[in-house]
Amino acid sequence: MSKKILAFGASSSIHSINKKFATFAANQIANAEITILDLNDFEMPIYSVDKEAAGGIPDLAKQFKAQIQAADGIIVSFAEHNGSYTAAYKNIYDWMSRLEGSVWGEKTMILLATSPGGRGAKTVLEGALSAYSRGNKNVVAHFSLPVFNQNFSEQGGITDSGLLAGFKEQLALFEEAI
């Protein structure tokens, strides 16, 4: 039986390195049915209680959550904007949090992050790990890839052997937990 893996980069950039990284990670899992989401397909009004009261929760938030519910495992690669989540991602998350149940539905998760810089978006990854580990006991792995443009190739994936070994270790934890 194949595992259903949902992956996305938490960025709305059409050139998102985090979407590339999440896609790469998903494609490393054997016998998997992979769904890659693009946050641009889920653009909604900025969340507010007033907008929710006036129009309810957008269907796009319900559709995103349905994708989560259909998955066995979730791969998220976080982009970092000023030390935090991107506005596009945070808005989707805010809308989904208004739906019944846990946002992540207790799904097995691996949290990733990458950036062009030397910290590899570690600040946002640490924040996500702290927040999501409290709400979902199935956050089983995490990995940050620094200096994306030097350590990743579209053809071969992670090019640095030490980083690749660390990534494979974390991905194995995720795969075993699904």
Image: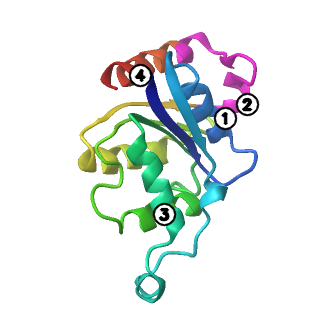
Residue 92 vs 18, above or below: the answer is below
**Residue beneath label 4, please?**
170
Residue 40 % position (x, y): 66, 57
Foreground of the two, 59 or 74: 59
- The mark nearer the N terminus, 2 or 1, is 1
The label nearer to you, 3 versus 1, is 3
Q: Amino acid at mark 2?
A: Asn
Q: Is residue 110 visible?
A: no
Rate crowding at label 2 as few (under 14), some (14 to 19) or many (20 or more) other CA atoms within 10 Å: few
The label nearer to you, 3 versus 4, is 3
- The mark nearer the N terminus, 3 or 4, is 3
Magenta span contains residue 148: yes
> Farthest residue toward the front?
1
**CB under 8 Å between discs 4 and 2:** no
Q: Amino acid at mark 4?
A: Gln
Magenta span contains residue 154: yes
**Residue beneath label 3, please?**
61
**Residue beneath label 1, please?**
20
